[in-house]
Amino acid sequence: VERPFIVNTGRIRDQWHTMTRTGVSDRLFQHRSLPFVELHALDAAEYQIEEGQLVELENDFGTYRGLARVTAGEARRQVFVPIHWSLQFASAATANSLIRPVTDPVSGQPESKHGTASLKKIGIATWVRLVVPHKIAANVLATLDTLCEFRATTPDGAGFTYELALQASGHNLISELKNLTGVTQVVSFKDTT
């Protein structure tokens, strides 16, 4: 499989490592609340990717999914992904899943910075925003992740917000969410724009 993109990983302004401490602060998520893939505008045009679309990077080691951030600041055929999201905060946005497991023979320090991958957009039919007053248990998240193409978790001051993306209609997901989370009141809407 061809992997035409160089993957660069790194930090973003308001997060540190895998959000073990910063991930509990809703204020720090105001800068970048969801995992992303930053790519050059000409690469986005070539792959018919628009700002905010769900995209996937893939190689022999794993996959990374995030929202496209189209910019002229990224070099052609290179993408940037942040290192901060773990399975606790997103279903498929662990940057290290794309990086060869190479470590320095003396220090044991992982390379963890650079890889190569293919890029594609993921067609999403339904986005669901689930807002709950408590954190959803890890076993429920694992089940939820099997139902969705993408999940991202952010604290919002009064609880947690879960952004969910599905390739199919979300009608069955609402009842499944009630069963999984114990949420009894659901407000749903359909964007027809």
Image (cartoon, grey):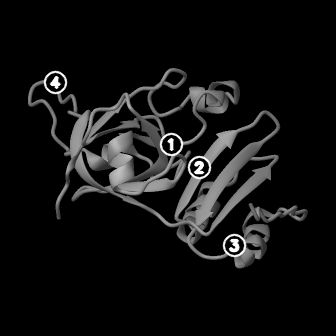
Residue 170's disc number: 3
**Residue 101 seen in render:** yes
Which circle's residue, 3 or 4, is located before the other in the chain? 4
Which circle's residue, 2 or 1, is located before the other in the chain? 1
Query: Where on the picture, by quarter, is residue 183?
Result: bottom right
Which circle's residue, 4 or 2, is located before the other in the chain? 4
Q: Mark 2 points at which residue?
A: 152
Query: Where on the picture, by quarter, is residue 148?
Result: bottom right
Residue 144 rendering spot, x and y as whole percentages? 61, 65
Q: Is 25 left or right of 131, judged from the image as shown?
A: left
Whether the residues at callouts 3 and 2 have beta carbons within 8 Å, the answer is no
The residue tagged with tag 1: helix, strand or loop?
loop
Q: Name the residue under label 4.
A: 107
Residue 35's disc number: 1
**Residue 86 seen in render:** no
Cα–Cα span, label 3 and label 4: 48 Å
Residue 86's disc number: none
Residue 119 rendering spot, x and y as whole percentages? 32, 55
Cα–Cα span, label 4 and label 2: 33 Å
Which circle's residue, 3 or 2, is located before the other in the chain? 2
Q: How crowded is mark 2: few (under 14 residues within 10 Å), some or many (20 or more)?
A: many
Which circle's residue, 1 or 4, is located before the other in the chain? 1
The residue tagged with tag 4: helix, strand or loop?
loop
Give the label, 3 or 4, closer to the camera. Answer: 3
Name which residue type carries label 2: Ala
Cα–Cα span, label 1 and label 3: 22 Å
Q: Specify the quadrant that holds the N terminus.
A: bottom left
Above or below for 104 versus 182: above
Q: Residues within 10 Å of mark 4 (few under 14, many from 20)?
A: few
Cα–Cα span, label 3 and label 2: 17 Å
The residue tagged with tag 3: helix, strand or loop?
loop
